[in-house]
Amino acid sequence: MLPAVGAAPASPDYSRFVRRIRRRYAAELALLPTGAPVRSSMQTCFAALQAQGLDTGAALRVLRQLVLERLVELDCGPPTQAATTPAASDANTALRMITCAMTDLAELSLDIAVHESRKSLDALHGAPQACEPPALPGQRAQLWVIGMGKLGARELNVSSDIDLIYVYDQDGQTCGRSDGRGAISNHEYFAQQVKAIYNLIGETTEHGFVFRVDLALRPNGNSGPAAVSLGALEDYFQVQGREWERFAWLKSRVVAPRECIDSGSAQDLRASVLPFVFRRYLDYGVFDALRVLQRQIREHAAKRAAGHPERANDVKMSRGGIREIEFTVQLLQVVRGGQFPELRTRSTLAALQRIASAGLMAQDTAHALARAYVFLRHVEHRIQYLDDQQTHVLPTRDDDLAWVAQTMGYSSCCPFLGELDTHRELVAQEFDTLLGKKSDCKGCGKGAVTAPQEIDELLEKLSDRWPEGFRARIELWREHPRVLGLRDEARARLTQLVQRTAQWLLEGKVGEEAALRVVDWIEPLLRRESYLALLIERPAVHERLLRLLGAARWPARYLLQHPGVIDELASDAMLHERFDARAFMEELQQRLAALRRTGEDDEESCLNLLRRAHHAEVFRTLARDVEGALTVEQVADDLSALAEAVLAVTTDWCWQHLKNRHREIPLFAIIAYGKLGGKELGYGSDLDIVFVYEDEDERAPEVYAGFVRKLINWLTIKTAEGDLFEIDTALRPNGNSGLLVTRFEAYANYQQQRGSNTAWTWEHQAITRARFVQGNPSLRARFDAVRLAVISATRDIPALRQEIGAMREKVRAAHPVKGEKSAGKFDVKHSPGGMVDAEFAVQFLVLSQARNHAGLAANVGNIALLQHAEAAGLLPAGMGQAAAAAYRELRRVQHQARLNEEPTQVTLPALQPERDAILALWRAVFGA
């Protein structure tokens, strides 16, 4: 068919579909209000069509024709006309206009169809009744129309079918007619309603159809019932739900009836869907499922194109098409969305940006895929504008292809096709890279040795050259119940993992100790098959894991407690970064906001979110540590900054969950002592903290006491994700017999020796390392002033020296070192000349000299304070530097010993110079 007389090649009039509409419905075109079609304007048009005498089904069908004509005009019309909408100047906005309009049309049509179909069924059988709690007597059971795929994501194209699943919220039966007859089960009622909705929406009449309807995604596919109860759907997810269905349900959304959406009752569906789609652990098992699915799609596309080469130009299903962009995005969402709720969004373009923001994809790649997606969707629409056919294949007629190119803004077909190929090639490469493309050569495997699929076969065929210890350890798996209990697919993965580890052993890439530790690590986790899948899918993670476990013993224990953190090893950049407190807290707030959007922000979810984030950051620091990327001081700085960030976020969230809070922001603070106060936190260190408040409200004592108890519980309780910290509040005024949270004025009086109840010298020693780490800014300055007043107060120096010396003897007596005298053992922390001696010497220097030497008042750590004391002439020349260097080395030795789970004791003369330097410091300060 030739274009209309006088129609420009790029005019909407070229579309055969548009010409048919304008001929058939010329009188009705003006009924649709001007501008981009939206739900309200469609509702107005629908009412006008009904006023002309059309029944519901006919009015909806004519409405569809008018909406599509308008969209073609706005999308492909000349700029002067298209300028009525901002969409014409921006491809993204134009795409959003089209997809939102089509989605609005589908939602409006389904809402009308649901209400229309009820009328006749209610007259025959009465309304379906909700009988299960918490339903009220006489409450109507509801049918939810769930939009899947592009409808759920508000991404419908102009000739889309709509993938629907019908779910009703409660079983039961209808109330029957007034004559007491006609009652049927809710299941029968809703099955009939589904047929009635199809007749209104999907059946083809003289006016065409509203939407093609596909119910194949429902539980058990085309063999399943047309509508299922919510309970049956939950059972299906738990027992029969398949991996590919998780991708389908990712975009699911209740789209009708509107009353259920507005009332919030449809949110009940999310409680069933979210755990099915997003697993608690990183879920790399879906890679194989998606590989199989995409292979089937590509094979199907190849078969369709056999003998019809033009069919290879399918912008949706062929290599590098729209579907591969969607799969790329959905795969990363399904794998990570359980732990990273901010990735849970239905929109493909929004998800791409969130994936990039989460560091799962390079920003440039995300932008390139987004551009490709928008381009391909516009091409798809123009293909469908031609004849309103559900096709995604480029037209074969030259004039049709030229029209598509020109409406896309190209002068001819060649530059258009070149741009199309560029986008598709980029998409295909990214998709193949993500899935780890395997060879497509069907003849390559002939004569090749098939890889062993079982541990027994592997041991028999390939273990002759393995190190004996590793071979013996794997031999134990022949009869291990956990191994024997694995599914065939998982056992094959385990065998592949062992084979790869053994190969790296033989190549010298890893040591036997690392290989044995990875076996010990994976054995208790065998039932969590996702970890096997992760290591198979990510060889780089497997290799880094072996290197990490080979470097020290403690990482293996940490990984066993928190196996989900292993995926942090996938990042190449991670080893070269440092902890960023601001980014950490912003990311947590984004995740909390994502949980709020789905109604999952209960206390348990908040606790688990905090724990997962904390464990991941600790593991990142640990990985950098054992790789030698951080010094001991940097490790302590980062762990301390992490603890402060966790305290800040936990305090905020916990206060928001406090039922009896009396103000939006608490007048409250946390003072850190000990290792957190001195920024010397180690792995697994507890937190020495003190809570204070300054609030004149009469409810304050009770509110803050309850708040602190709740906060400590949030920090210490073990959930499914583990715990955060052990909390020690013994340094609060009056120790364990004192109040858990103290009014700041009382705290200040206690520390500054005002009144009869005052601090001991050892408490003043502790305050030398104290820091304000969280709370109301007004209290920070007040705490700093109290601390300065305490450490710079006038003191009896001989008495101070005697008290601190006596306290040192008490600490030494509480930590005896076995073999210290008989076998020359030296404990880097507690022996004479150890770290505690250096710390006590620094505390004495601060408390005795800060009044005259302001540099000693700063809480900058023992090493810097020793150096400052020497510079101030308080220590002989060279002594401060020597003691500082010795203290740094003792910390390094202690840190390494703990990583390897080894004793912190050495046999002299090891560390003799360091011991001598600290002893010299002690003698110079205490004279003994």
Image (cartoon, rainbow, N blue to C red):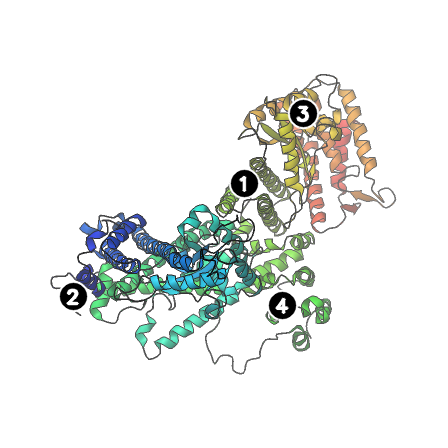
Q: Residue at x 44, y 67 (%)?
A: 216
Instruction: Work out whether residue 823 can be spotted.
Output: yes
Front residue of 455 and 659: 659
Q: Indicate whether 860 appears above or below 187.
A: above
Q: List x then y, in percent, for residue 804.
A: 77, 27
Which residue position is annotated with label 1? Answer: 581
CA gap, disc 2 and disc 1 = 63 Å
Which residue position is annotated with label 3? Answer: 873
Crowdedness near tag 2: few (<14), some (14–19) or many (≥20) residues, C-alpha within 10 Å: some
Assign the C terminus to one quadrant of the image. Answer: top right
Label placed on residue 129: none
Front label number (4 vs 1): 4
- Answer left or right for 591 relative to 563: left
Looking at the image, is mark 2 or mark 3 earlier in the sequence?
2
Residue with the most extreme right position: 822
Helix, strand or loop under label 3:
loop
CA gap, disc 4 and disc 1 = 38 Å
CA gap, disc 2 and disc 4 = 63 Å
Which residue position is annotated with label 4? Answer: 494
Residue 769 sits in quarter: top right
Three-letter code for the amino acid on which mark 2 is drawn: Pro
Q: List x then y, in percent, for residue 200.
A: 34, 61
Three-letter code for the amino acid on which mark 3 is drawn: Gly
Residue 810 sits in quarter: top right
Front label number (3 vs 4): 4
CA gap, disc 1 and disc 3 = 38 Å
Helix, strand or loop under label 4:
helix
